[in-house]
Image: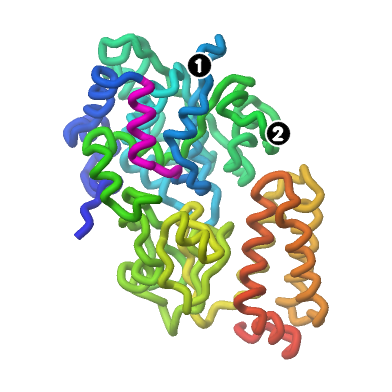
């Protein structure tokens, strides 16, 4: 039986209040860190825990922190990516609405490790309750002396500010997020230099996800061995999975990293709402879909990568046998086309043409050469776009074509969508 860690207080009345958080041991990990760890020791501890970033890329958190240069004479910044614009994803929203102090405590621990005195929480503007709860939690933390000058009577001082996004998916890319905070149009920047060296205002900057920060107090409290004892050694720890689509019990689940996709969907979420499962998108629409026959794959970074997909944001979208894969691909490509920042030609033009072809197919006016054209567009976009948005679009469409080419052919042969 797996005991919840990140969601353990979700059903507690007033769980978003600092009184409730402190009653369950909140901010004790911060006190332990400030009075018992050097920044270098703390970074090594997070490295030893092998905490992988929960925002999608899965980069080792402690390693990312270690890239921040020392004694540059510039301020160091910390940013929390709470934009959460990936379709099918709602885990960070739940944490901010129900237990925002867990994220704040994690941010303070990270800020101490990298020597940052200022943090920004970048929240998508549509998350009105999240914004309200986070701003309220920050006021409570300031009132308790957990933010501001000389936190817990130590030399550590830190301020956190909330920055609202305007619903641009591209801001999930860390350099575009930084551009937005600085007041410029949100477009990815060329790397290197990476943000750890030249990020916000050209200063050393670390960007982590809400769920990543939420893991930190528990690693400090329970230790490295506890954390590494959950899930596979290469990707350990508890994980939040967002279940949606045509599934009997949609919702937010906390389970060990590495649980099989089949167990997650069939045992915990109750399987397909009607009929049988056709395919599952494991990590938000950026992740290539996996057909039912391959659902025994583990839900962790390495296992899904080996299966030709990715964990991403763990936004699990279930398709049953009544779902039209062509329509799913069309809606997905419409999304990527709409959200492309337009900076690079492969993404800007490739996604637009793919969207047009898919609309023609779904309307029953497709031609045999359209399938070849879609594959050609995927090849032209993947690996040639400025950031990962183009790659994700091409990868997602490519998987639909690979696993369900027959459905695309049926749309052409029958001159209509056979599922609607």
Report the residue marked by disc 1: 70
Residue 145 among magenta residues: no
Image location (x, y in percent) of residue 213 = 39, 36
Q: Nearer the viewer, residue 340 or 188?
A: 188
- Give the label on residue 185, or none: 2
Q: Is residue 254 above or below residue 377?
A: above
Q: Is residue 143 above or below residue 361?
A: above
**Closer mark to the observer between disc 2 and disc 1:** 1
Residue at the image position 21 percent from the left and 30 percent from the top: 22
Q: Residue furthest left?
A: 23
Q: Is residue 105 above or below residue 285?
A: above
Q: Quick one: quadrant of the C terminus?
A: bottom right
Q: How many marks?
A: 2
How many C-alpha atoms fall within 10 Å of the one at disc 1: few (<14), some, or many (≥20)?
A: few
Image location (x, y in percent) of residue 88 = 50, 58
Q: Is residue 213 visible?
A: yes
Residue 234 appears left or right of 165 = left
Q: Give the quadrant of residue 261.
A: bottom left
Tell whether label 1 touches label 2 (CB within 8 Å): no
Residue stretch in magenta: 39-53
Q: Nearer the viewer, residue 23 or 296?
A: 296
């Amino acid at each position: 039986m797996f005991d919840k860690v990140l969601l353990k207080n979700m059903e507690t009345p007033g769980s978003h209040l600092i009184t409730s958080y402190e009653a369950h041991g909140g901010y004790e990990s911060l006190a332990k860190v400030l009075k018992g760890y050097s920044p270098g020791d703390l970074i090594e501890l997070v490295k030893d825990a092998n905490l992988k970033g929960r925002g999608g890329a899965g980069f080792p958190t402690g390693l990312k922190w270690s890239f921040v240069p020392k004694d540059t004479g510039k301020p160091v910044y910390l940013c929390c990516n709470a934009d959460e614009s990936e379709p099918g994803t709602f885990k960070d929203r739940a944490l901010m609405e129900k237990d925002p102090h867990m994220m704040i405590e994690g941010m303070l621990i990270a800020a101490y490790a990298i020597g940052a005195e200022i943090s920004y929480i970048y929240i998508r503007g549509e998350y009105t309750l999240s914004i309200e709860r986070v701003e309220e939690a920050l006021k409570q933390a300031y009132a308790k002396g957990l933010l501001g000058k000389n936190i817990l009577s130590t030399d550590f001082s830190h301020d956190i500010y909330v920055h609202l996004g305007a619903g641009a998916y591209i801001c999930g890319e860390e350099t575009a997020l930084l551009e937005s905070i600085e007041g410029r149009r949100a477009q990815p920047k060329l790397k290197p230099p990476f943000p750890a060296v030249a990020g916000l205002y050209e200063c050393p900057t670390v960007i982590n996800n809400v769920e990543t920060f939420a893991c930190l107090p528990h690693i400090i409290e329970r230790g490295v061995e506890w954390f590494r004892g959950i899930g596979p050694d290469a990707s350990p720890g508890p994980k939040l999975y967002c279940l949606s689509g045509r599934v009997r019990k949609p919702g937010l689940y906390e389970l060990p990293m590495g649980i099989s996709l089949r167990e997650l969907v069939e045992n915990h979420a109750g399987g397909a709402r009607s009929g049988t499962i056709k395919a599952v998108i494991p990590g938000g629409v950026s992740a290539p879909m996996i057909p039912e026959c391959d659902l025994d794959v583990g839900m962790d970074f390495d296992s899904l990568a080996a299966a030709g997909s990715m964990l991403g944001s763990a936004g699990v979208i279930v398709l049953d046998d009544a779902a039209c894969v062509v329509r799913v691909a069309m809606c997905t490509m419409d999304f990527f086309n709409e959200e492309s920042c337009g900076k690079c030609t492969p993404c800007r033009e490739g996604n637009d043409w793919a969207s047009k072809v898919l609309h023609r197919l779904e309307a029953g006016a497709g031609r045999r050469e359209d399938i070849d054209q879609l594959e050609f567009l995927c090849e032209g976009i993947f690996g040639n776009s400025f950031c990962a948005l183009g790659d994700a679009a091409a990868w997602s469409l490519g998987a639909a074509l690979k696993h369900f080419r027959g459905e695309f052919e049926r749309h052409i042969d029958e001159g209509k969508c056979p599922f609607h």
